[in-house]
Image (cartoon, rainbow, N blue to C red):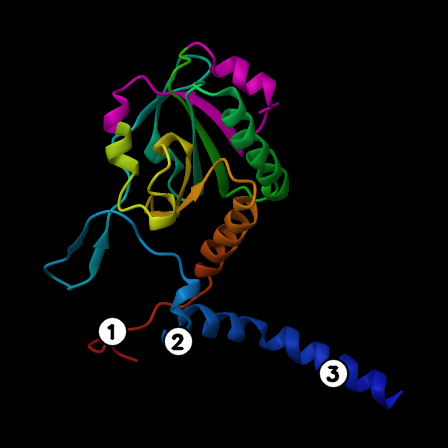
């Protein structure tokens, strides 16, 4: 009985301490490697001295019904961007298979979205939605009719060394809730599915980390 009670006490203590432990892991300098970086140009605010990170703007999409969609409407969500070119059917299937698994895992999380950009199939949005049974808001496909180079310039910056040789359309791009680019992953490697799950969990955990006060702010 004593051992049982000790075991229950230890479990309870672990549960109670978990938020604090998570905060330490994500926020202390010695564990910064677990955070996800910010990609894109950075500026400094004149008034506060805060770093202002790049956020994605000015992308217009078209849904299955032909309605124009401003990409900024996804703000407030974690957004995983996926590109379809139909240049290589095998590559497209490999990318889609990862998204099927990710969508199934996170479909109950209303603030996690998968957005598919159809680049070479301007009449295929409804077909794509039907093929992958995209009947909810968690994963939707849209036509992109603008210049592809312009889209690339909006989304691709300073790629990690291990994926610099990839076609940019074979990358997953993960944005945080403020539209800031936080992760690039190789979209045709199945092993990246686990990494994307971790990326999403870490960005979700950031929501629970209290922001540190500046020195000139009152305690």
As drawn, the residue found furthest toward the bottom would be 2
Q: Quadrant of residue 8?
A: bottom right
Q: How far apart are marks 2 and 3 (CA)?
A: 30 Å
For discs 2 and 3, the disc positioned in front in the rendered view: 2
Q: Can residue 18 be seen in this view?
A: yes
For discs 1 and 2, the disc positioned in front in the rendered view: 2
Q: Would you place residue 161 above or below residue 62 in this image?
A: below
Q: In this view, does 159 lie to the left or right of 198?
A: left
Q: Mark 2 points at which residue?
A: 30
Q: In which quadrant of the rendered image does the C terminus lie?
A: bottom left
Which is more N-terminal, label 3 or label 1?
A: 3
Decide whether residue 134 is among the magenta residues.
Answer: yes
The secondary structure type at the circle numbered 3 is helix
Q: Mark 1 points at which residue?
A: 214
Q: In which quarter of the image is residue 66?
A: top left
Q: Would you place residue 215 above or below residue 108 in this image?
A: below
As drawn, the residue found furthest toward the left would be 46
Q: Which of 87 and 213 is in front in this view?
A: 87
Query: Which residue is found at the position 52% from the left and 40% from the top?
Result: 189
Q: Mark 3 points at which residue?
A: 9
Which is more N-terminal, label 3 or label 2?
A: 3
Q: Nearer the viewer, residue 23 or 88?
A: 88
Residue 126 position within the rendered picture, expressed as x and y whole percent measured from the top left: 51, 14
Q: What stretch is highlighted in magenta?
A: 123-150
Q: In which quadrant of the rendered image does the N terminus lie?
A: bottom right
Q: Is residue 30 left or right of residue 6?
A: left
Query: Which residue is found at the position 60% from the left and 33% from the top?
Result: 100
């Amino acid at each position: 009985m004593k051992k049982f009670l000790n075991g229950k006490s230890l479990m309870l203590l672990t549960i109670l301490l978990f938020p604090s432990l998570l905060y330490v892991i994500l926020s202390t300098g010695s564990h910064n490697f677990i955070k996800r970086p910010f990609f894109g140009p950075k500026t400094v605010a004149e008034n506060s001295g805060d770093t202002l990170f790049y956020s994605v703007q000015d992308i217009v999409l078209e849904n299955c019904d032909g309605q124009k969609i401003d990409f900024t409407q996804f703000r407030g969500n974690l957004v995983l961007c996926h590109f379809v070119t139909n240049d290589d059917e095998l590559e497209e299937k490999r990318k889609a298979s990862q998204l099927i698994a990710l969508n199934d895992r996170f479909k109950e999380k209303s603030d996690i979205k998968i957005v598919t950009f159809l680049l070479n199939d301007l009449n295929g949005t409804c077909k794509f939605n039907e093929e992958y049974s995209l009947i909810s808001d968690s994963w939707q496909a849209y036509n992109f009719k603008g210049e592809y180079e312009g889209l690339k310039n909006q989304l691709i910056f300073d790629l990690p060394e291990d994926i610099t040789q990839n076609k940019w359309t074979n990358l997953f791009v993960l944005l945080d809730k403020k539209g800031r680019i936080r992760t690039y992953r190789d979209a045709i490697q199945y092993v990246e599915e686990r990494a994307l799950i971790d990326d999403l969990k870490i960005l979700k955990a950031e929501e629970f980390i209290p922001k540190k006060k500046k020195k000139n702010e009152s305690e």
